[in-house]
Image: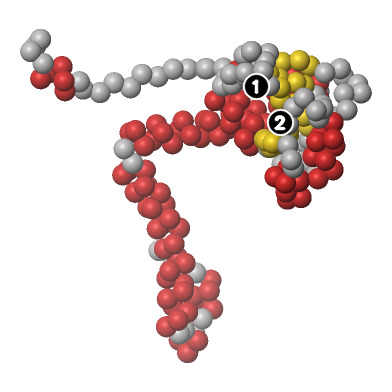
Amino acid sequence: MQITEQGKAAGPESISLEALQTDVISFYEPEKSIKTKVNVASTASPQDLIDTGFEEIERKTKDELLSKLKEIDPYTFERIILILLKKMGYGDFIETSKSGDGGIDGIINEDQLGLEKIYIQAKRYAESKVRETDIRNFIGAMSGDTRKGIFVTTSTFDEKSKTKAKDAHHTIILIDGSRLVDLMHKFNVGVQIKSKYEIKAVDNDFFESEAV
C-alpha cells in the first residue's frame, strides 16, 4: 500500500475525521463492487444463469430485428405485417395497391371464413413518432364495411395519437416497435431457431414406480 499524493500534501492540522472517512470509503469502494458482483454470480443457481443468458440473447435478437425492420423498404414491411397476422391465426389477407390506397396498406379477415375484415396501416419510421393526423387519416380511409383497424409502426405513438385511437368510434389497435418485435419473436416471423438445448433432471417417479 502506498500513500497517495493527496495524503502527502495534507498536514496533520488539515486532516479531519470526515475527510478521512470519505477517503477510506472511496479507496475500498471498487473492491466492494467487484465482491458484490462475484457474490451475486456465485449465489445464482445454474438454472438462474441459463435463464439470464436466454433473456440476454432474446433481447439482442429483438434489437437486431427492430433495426432490420427500419432498414427494409416500406412495401416489404407492409407484407411482413400481413404475414405476421396470418401466423397469429387470422384469415387470408389482401394487399392493397401500392399507390392511392387511401391510407390502407392491407385488409385481413378476422376469421378463417372472412365474416369480418380488419384494415391494416403499417408505418416504417426510423425515429419519428406516429401522430394524431396519422390516426385520423387511417380512420377516414376505413370504409363502411369494417369498424376495426390495426396500426403498426416500428417507432412509437405520441400521446395525442393514442387518445385519438382510444376515443374513435372504430376499434383501433396500436402496435409499436417494441410490441411488434415481441410478436414476431413469439410467432417466428423474421427469426429462426439457431440451437436447442435439453435440460434433464432426475425422474423421482421412475425410482418410486413398480417397474424398477
Instruction: Name the outermost residue toward the top.
Output: 211
Residue 85 in the image: state x and y as whole percent.
65, 22
Residue 110: mark in rendering:
1
Residue 9 in view (yes/no) = yes
- Frontmost residue, 92 versus 180: 92
List the single residue furthest toward the right.
100
Which colour scheme appears in the figure?
A: secondary structure
- Determine crowd level at label 1: few under 14, some 14-19, many 20+ residues with C-alpha closer than 10 A: many
* Residue placed furthest toward the bottom: 13
Sequence-wise, the earlier of marks 1 and 2 is: 1
152 or 28: nearer the eye? 152
**Residue appearing at x 58%, y 31% in the figure:** 182
Which three-letter amino acid code belongs to the residue tagged 2? Lys
Kind of residue indicated by mark 1: Glu
Relative height, residue 28 to residue 71 (above, below): below
Question: Do the residues under discs 1 and 2 have CB atoms within 8 angstroms?
Answer: yes
Q: Position of residue 147 (x, y in %)?
A: 73, 31
Secondary structure at numbered mark 2:
strand
On the image, numbered disc 2 is attached to which residue? 148
Residue 165 percent coordinates (x, y): 73, 42
